[in-house]
Every structure is written in C-alpha cells, then in structure tokens.
C-alpha cells in the first residue's frame, strides 16, 4: 500500500466540510482505486429510515473522485449516475471505486456501494482533471483562488 497516496487522499477528505459532516473515512487508496466508509446517522435517512439516495450518490461521487485523484490529481465531476438496487439499510456504508479509463481531459470511473456486505447501489462518474497529481486541494474560494 502506498502510504503517501493514502495520506494525500485522507488530507483531501479532511479538507471537505461535507465529508467531515457525513463522517466519511478513507479506508484505502491505491493507484486507480479508493475505498471509503460512512457510518449510519439518522440525519442521512429518508422518510422510511433508509439511507437517502442523495447520500448514496454523494458516497459514489466521492469514492470515484478519490479513485481518479490517485492517478490525475484534483478532479471535478461533470456527470455521475446512480443505480439504487435495493433499500440502503445498515450501520455502515462502504463505497469501492475504480478508474475505468484515465485520460488527460476526462476520467471514467465506476463504483459499488455496500451496506455491510450487501450491494445496495452502483454508479459511474465522468470527471475532469483540474490539478496536478499529488497536489493538495486548492484553498476554499474557487478554482482561481
């Protein structure tokens, strides 16, 4: 395991207020792969007490962004899709993302989201590189700050 790469992705994760609010933890980061986890929290539930589809999308988007960042540096999503396969009920959610095809102008990724050991959603993202590999995230305030 590349500990510098893992530390870099964890630093990016820690810099995002939304990720901190969600309690997202980076479990693994390897070239072209990232795995994150989030504990269940009631505020993330929808009317039936299941993980809201918007949070499922956020986990997929985040994991895919981290997988891409391991190869191309900072990225922004230009498109993502989520397939909700079954109700997302559990104490912990784990998203595993991989880069399908990296590129200089676009990075294609895919992800699986689990509640415990149960696959609850899949997703794909199309990401645009906005920085150099290995660089920390830009300061708050926009891309040109």
Image: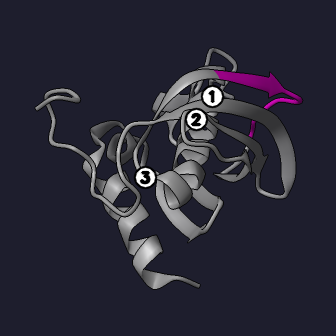
Residue at x-position 55% and y-position 58%: 71
Q: Position of residue 106 (x, y in %)?
A: 60, 33
**Labels 2 and 3 touching (C-beta < 8 A):** no
The mark closer to the camera, 1 or 2, is: 2
- Depicted 35 relative to depicted 63: above or below: below
Q: Is residue 87 left or right of residue 29?
A: right
Q: Earlier in the sequence, mark 3 or mark 1?
A: 1
Give the number of marks: 3
As measured in the structure, the alpha-carbon distance from the residue carrying label 1 to the one carrying label 2 is 6 Å
Residue at x-position 21% and y-position 44%: 138
Quarter of the image that includes the N terminus: bottom right
The mark found on residue 61 in the picture is 2
SS type, badge 1: helix
Magenta-colored stretch includes residue 88: yes
Residue at x-position 64% and y-position 38%: 60
Location of residue 59 (image quadrant) = top right
Q: Position of residue 4 (x, y in %)?
A: 40, 79
The mark closer to the camera, 3 or 1, is: 3
Residue identifier under label 3: 73
Magenta-colored stretch includes residue 113: no
- Magenta segment range? 80-89
**Labels 1 and 2 touching (C-beta < 8 A):** yes
């Amino acid at each position: 395991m590349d500990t510098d790469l893992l530390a870099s992705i964890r630093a990016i994760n820690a810099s995002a207020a939304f990720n901190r609010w969600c309690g997202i933890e980076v479990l693994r980061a390897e070239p072209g792969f990232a795995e994150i986890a989030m504990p269940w929290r009631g505020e993330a539930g929808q009317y039936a007490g299941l993980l809201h589809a918007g949070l499922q999308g956020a986990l997929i988007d985040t994991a895919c962004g981290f997988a891409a960042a391991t190869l191309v540096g900072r990225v922004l999503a230009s498109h993502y899709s989520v397939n909700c396969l079954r109700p997302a009920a559990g104490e912990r959610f784990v998203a595993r993302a991989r880069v399908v095809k990296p590129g200089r102008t676009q990075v294609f990724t895919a992800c699986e989201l689990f509640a415990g050991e149960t696959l609850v959603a899949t997703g794909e993202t199309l990401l645009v590189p906005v920085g150099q590999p290995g660089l920390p995230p830009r300061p708050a305030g926009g891309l040109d700050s």
